[in-house]
Image (tube, rainbow, N blue to C red):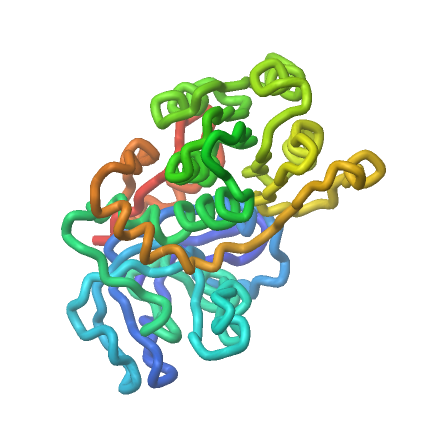
Amino acid sequence: MKALVYYGDHDIKYEEKPKPEILKPTDAIVKIVKTTICGTDLGIYKGKNPEITPGRILGHEGIGIIEQVGESVTNFKVGDKVLISCVTSCGSCEYCKKQLYAHCKDGGWILGYMIDGVQAEYTRIPHADNSLYKYPDTIDDDVAVMLSDILPTGHEIGVQYGNVKPGDAIAIVGAGPVGMSVLLTSQFYSPSTIIMVDMDENRLELAKTLGATHTVNSAVENAEEAIKKIAGEEGVDVAIEAVGIPPTWDICQKIVKPGGHLANVGVHGVKVDFEIQKLWIKNLTITTGLVNTNTTPMLLKATATNKLPLKSLITHHYKLDQIEEAYQVFLNGAKEKAMKIIIEVN
């Protein structure tokens, strides 16, 4: 089969790899129909995760058709169309019993990281009964890909961990795919003010169409001052960091009001300054996290109503044999006006 393979910092190749096989009775083999590229994949490409073994097939988001199931798989059969969760969960360890599937002792985020992923013609999914989801025909296949990772990540780690409530003023710092997912799912909880912060005017314009009440371009104005003009001098009830770099973290810790929440969603690769000397007195709740996907079933139901404009996040389509080009487009997202790229597997 063909697959996108990682060999080291800025070294990926589209090449022939052996088709995966059932290794355990709880496995399923899925023929990939559509996949995508995540910001985390770009981090791997840039050498952010040196622990990854050269030769690893990348990718952790996608949909496909069940091709083969292990003898212990009971929820799925050959021919089922399925959503692949970015998080693999055994369902029985101490963390899975707490719905902390991200920390499953025999799973978590392993696809395209610790085991071969989904940017390929076929993939092996461990613990298939707990790591795959059937979805109705009312959900477009392109849209279903958004439910592998970005929508549950934005909802769980941004909105739920941030404890967004009716009437809140919230600021989302970072208008990439995950930030946009925070924007969409925050509206389930009726905040009164949603401020989107980014340096890309195209993304900010899209955010306005998706429900942002205000936008701040941090490339041309002081984000802290602009946000406080909108929300009041004390700041916002919830600040959500959705990039994973020190400047966006700094904005968030400066704009959250006493008693508020700071929810970090971005994947950080370097240390940040945590101004505890200023923040200890503010009675803040500060959260971090990797998506657990425990809200994926609910998000599937919400998406099936076709009331979430998720297709607006999709800007480019490529075939699998064009995936190296797609990576370059996503790497230059501002220039290429790229948000979410769908990769179709022939």
User: Would residue 55 be visible to someone looking at this image?
Assistant: no
* Residue 286 image point, x, y percent: 66, 45
Q: Quadrant of residue 235?
A: top right
Give coordinates of residue 49: x percent, y percent. Answer: 61, 55
Expressed as whole percent of the image width and height from the top left, the position of residue 213 reads 44, 20
**Placement of 277 over or under 21, stated as above or below:** above
Total labels: the figure holds 0
Looking at this view, name the residue that lies furthest to the right.
277
Q: Position of residue 66 (x, y in %)?
A: 22, 69
- Residue at 35% x, 40% y: name it: 341
Q: Nearer the viewer, residue 49 or 130?
A: 130
Looking at the image, which residue is at 33% across and 78% down?
Answer: 21
Left or right, 138 with respect to 1, comes to: left
Viewer-side residue, 18 vs 61: 61
Quadrant in the picture for residue 91: bottom left
- 5 over 146 or under it: above or below: below
Asked if 322 appears above or below 20 in the picture, the reply is: above
> Quarter of the image containing the N terminus?
bottom left
Q: Nearer the viewer, residue 177 or 32?
A: 177
Q: Look at 49% across and 38% down and name the residue there.
A: 165
